Image (cartoon, rainbow, N blue to C red):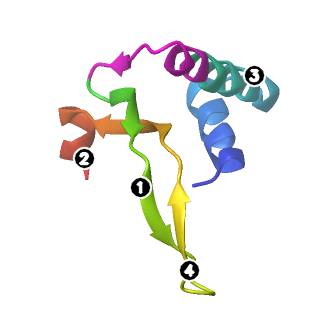
Amino acid sequence: MNKAQLIDALASDAGISKSQAKAALDSFTNSVGKALAGGDKVSLVGFGTFSVSRRNAREGRNPQTGKTIQIAAKNVAKFKAGAELSGKL
């Protein structure tokens, strides 16, 4: 499912217009992004938890040349599915 399909499903399920569903989805993703950028976790009971994880610096390899390169440390977004969501899979 891509973003457009998700917007269609949200609009249909909630009985709202596609533009309202798009605005709600954009607001959700922006709010989660801001919370993660601020170092917070976002927990949705039954669905899952979004959090930030630190990835340490490491050595990698350029696949074209085989040359060793340094990969910088960075923060990455992480999602852990909740029990209810895991049960549906």
How far separated are the C-alphas under marks 3 and 4? 45 Å
For the residue marked with disc 2, what is the amino acid? Lys
Q: Is residue 88 left or right of residue 3?
A: left
First in sequence: mark 3 or mark 2? Answer: 3
> Which residue is label 2 attached to?
88
Identify residue for label 4: 67
Q: Secondary structure at mark 4?
A: loop
Q: Are marks 4 and 1 in contact (CB under 8 Å)?
A: no
Q: Mark 1 to mark 2: distance in Å?
A: 36 Å
Residue 83 lies, in percent from the top left, at 18, 34
The answer to whether marks 4 and 2 mark residues whose Cβ atoms lie closer than 8 Å is no
Toward the bottom, the furthest residue is 65
Closer to us: 48 or 10: 48
Mark nearest the camera among 4 and 2 is: 4
**N-terminal-most mark, 4 or 2:** 4
Q: Magenta stretch: give its range.
A: 32-45
Question: What amino acid type is highlighted by mark number 4?
Answer: Lys
Pinpoint residue 60: horizontal percent, then vertical percent.
47, 67
Question: Which residue position is annotated with label 3?
Answer: 23
Q: Is residue 34 magenta?
A: yes
Q: Nearer the viewer, residue 61 or 20?
A: 61
- Per the image, the residue denoted by label 1 is 58
